[in-house]
Amino acid sequence: MSLPECYKTSHSSALNKISGRLREGREFILAFEPSRTVAENALLAFQNRWYGNVSEKKCAELTRHFYARYHLGRDNFAGLRQYLLVTGGENFPWINHFYMLLNDIYYRWAASDFLAERYESGLLEIPRATFDRGLKTQLPESVGEGSLTRYAQNLLTALRDNGLLEGVVNKRIISPALNADTLAFMLYSLSQWEAGGQNFDHSPLFFSLLKPREFLVPVFSEGERMGYWDFTGDRERLSFNLSYPSLNDWINRGRRS
């Protein structure tokens, strides 16, 4: 299936450098000043301890990679900040997952192909050797065994940070709760990039949520009651007309602030 351009086809070095980093990611979103350069924000991050007691070099690295992950256009970034302010970021692991899904081809494979296929088959345990073999088919042939091991570890750590796996050594697939506010923000963002609406079912985002359609129907029904869309689908096909009077209001408040 041909994917919309918002799903990047490259591998992000942020995955190797910073993995999930939920706490630091939230701080970046709330503190980053779009009117300043990334370098200027990195200095502010160091001076104001956005990421805790880390070095100036690490602040620069984190700020640079978070900018690549989250700042996918000024309007979307303003909406992302407003989402966090309005909701308190209760579902932020899903939001972090969403942006990593967009930004990294190997993370997307792991979440929407490998995990989704095993989850659907009822195979919840993740044998490391099985994961490594699958990842090897996705990597360039020039990637050696040492790099393969490192890539695999970074992916599994990020998936665990984002709530899709549990376990320190032995990993197991889980499917955390998802609320209508969070799903609406993700679909709203995709619609900005002409990839929302009817393109959701069978999309990488849909598969990576690790939920059968019947489990998503109540979430869509809740979103309809909240004014996010007109849900016209069922357990066989998730169809809806994107209309976000309530969500659009808080996104626009973020743009104006």
Image (cartoon, rainbow, N blue to C red):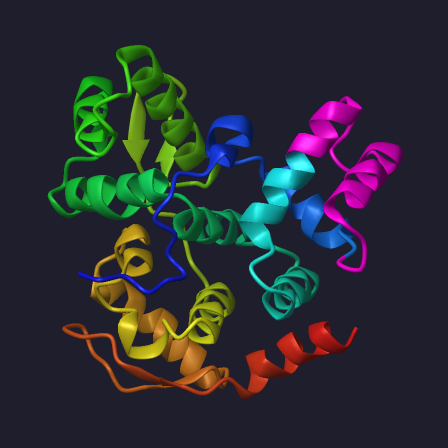
Q: Position of 248 compared to 252: left or right?
A: left
Residue extending farthest front: 142
Residue 125 at x, y = what percent?
Answer: 22, 29
Whether 256 is among the magenta residues is no
Up-down: is 121 above or below 201? above
Residue extending furthest top?
146
Residue nearest the viewer, comparing 77 with 170? 77
Outermost residue toward the right in this view: 47
Q: Is residue 221 left or right of residue 135?
A: right
Range covered by the magenta-colored residues = 34-61
* Whole-percent x, y for residue 21 in the image: 58, 35
Is 49 covered by the magenta stretch? yes
State the image coordinates of residue 163 (x, y, percent, origin top left). 43, 40
| The quadrant where residue 113 appears | top left
| Quadrant showing the N terminus | bottom left
Q: Quadrant of residue 54?
A: top right
Along the viewing direction, whichever of 122 and 146 lies nearer the viewer:
146
The residue at 29%/56% (across/down) is 204
Left or right of 81 on screen, residue 230? left
Q: In the rendered image, which quarter contains the C terminus?
A: bottom right
Total labels: the figure holds 0
At horizontal 21% and vertical 39% (from top left) the residue drawn is 114
> Residue 237 location in percent, x, y?
18, 75
Identified at 73% across, 33% down, the residue is: 51
